[in-house]
Amino acid sequence: MSAFNFQLELQTESGHLTLSILLFQDIAAVPFLALIPILAQGGNLGLPIAITLFKGIAVLIGILILGRWLLRPLFHFVASTRSAELFTLVVLLTSMSAAWLTHFMGLSLAFGAFLAGMMLSETEYRHQIEIEIRPFKDVLLGLFFIAVGMQLDFSTLTDIWPLVLALLVGVVFGKGFLIFILLKMANYSTVTSMRTGQNLAHAGEFGIALLVLAVITGVISPQDNHPILLTVILSMMLAPLLIRFSNTLAMKLFGQKLAKPDEDYSSQISQSVDKIENHVVICGFGRVGQVVAEHLIEQDIMFIGLDTNPSIVKKSWQEHEQVFFGDATNSKILEAAKIENAKALVICVDDSQAALNILRTARRLSQDIPMLVRTSDESMMEQLLDAGANEIIPETLEAGTMMITQLLLLLNKPVDEVYEQIKKFRSKRYPILDKFYRGDKNI
């Protein structure tokens, strides 16, 4: 499922349920990270498990307290040095220290790493931390799956395939059906319950981590782990297919077709703006789109904004603005925004390739509508013009124009002379405005 489709899926009831259960699954795996080393000891496990749980709770409370009272001033000091290297080192030191502490207490290293993530997420530096550790995440995640893959021996699959197939059917159908039944018992609709069950029928990624830990600690043997690991991996490979064809399966089983998330949302947009016309469609409602909207409001011109950032959409609705969640590269979204009735289309997204895709989609829907495009990449101007842009606004050009305007004024150049120079410069770069410049001393 694409990132956009996943965002749209979250707008549905089954999407909310899927995300909630996925988060709970990940959290539920954490106690097992602490308990698996204890299970390896054998014998009477009652007291060791109780002690481990007590240690886990104590470590959790201790680390969270340290995170709240120590990490914030520490990262404030590190950030004030403006050293990216020091910032990254402190992040790694924090993670390894938490992992060492849990290992010292007889718990797993993975449990400590999880707690370190919880600590770091509580700071106001969490977004920068995420950026700094992304290269490590990509490399280490790749190494993890390489290590998992090295444990698989597909030559033995011919001997154990009946067992793997039985386990796979049991996991996918068993887990999916169990979720379906539980949601039905919670009074959710049949369609929502079925779709959520399909979305979650596969085994989770934490299952692989738990299996690896169980083999390392000797809880299960490598021979027993092999068919289970194959089952988990195969079920994860099936997940995209289960989600993709949920509509088809719903139609076969219940005689009705679930609307796709983008169709659902385009329908909501269409209903909200059913009678609007002679408006402007703004694709991308970030800072540039909001400035455009502000000037349109001053001129009493109606507009519809489209953006894929839920926070922007929510804030805009609080301001009573007609801004909707939607990917403007999708023709259904543009149709729902009544592009055929619009007076103009303004593309304000900061990704030039996305702007090109929006432009092509919009031009297929309407041959006559004027289209203005913002771009940060002047090398794509020719492509944007060929795709149907009436006017292209390069960010570098406007930034440079504003800077030279202010500079000339600071150098005490006459105002009329400055604006005459800027007027001539812009008239060369923006032919569509040329007729307004001629003879007009106010621009």
Image (cartoon, helix red, strand yellow):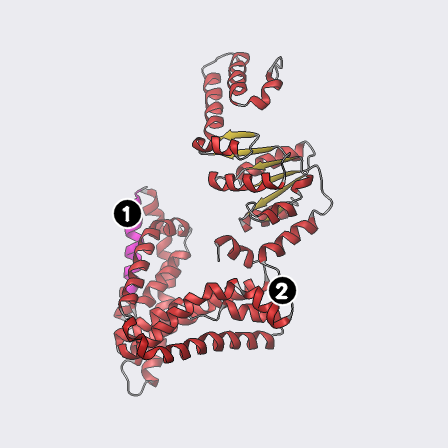
Identify the amino acid type marked 1. Leu
State the residue in front, 391 or 419: 391
Decide: few, some or many residues near mark 1? Use Cα within 10 Å; few <14, some 14-19, many ≥20: some
Badge 2 element: loop
Looking at the image, which residue is at 29% across and 64% down? 99
Can residue 33 be seen from the camera position used here? no
Q: Which residues are magenta?
A: 83-99
Give the image location of residue 414, x and y in percent. 52, 11
Give the image location of residue 259, x and y in percent. 62, 60
State the residue in front, 239 or 285: 239
Q: Quadrant of residue 170?
A: bottom left
Which residue of the protein is positioned furthest toward the front in this rendering? Answer: 158
Compute the Cα span from label 1 to label 2: 54 Å
Q: Earlier in the sequence, mark 1 or mark 2?
A: 1
Relative to residue 366, is residue 274 drawn left or right?
A: right
Identify the amino acid type marked 2. Lys
Numbered label attached to residue 121:
none
Are dots 1 and 2 in contact, CB under 8 Å? no
Which residue of the protein is positioned furthest toward the bottom in this rendering? Answer: 44
Looking at the image, which residue is at 45% across and 29% down? 396
Is residue 6 on the magenta stretch? no
Looking at the image, which residue is at 31% across and 48% down? 87
Badge 1 element: helix
Q: Write down the residue under mark 2.
A: 257
State the residue in front, 294 or 144: 144
Give the image location of residue 187, x and y in percent. 63, 74
Is residue 91 on the magenta stretch? yes
Q: Write down the residue under mark 1.
A: 86
Give the image location of residue 17, x and y in percent. 54, 66
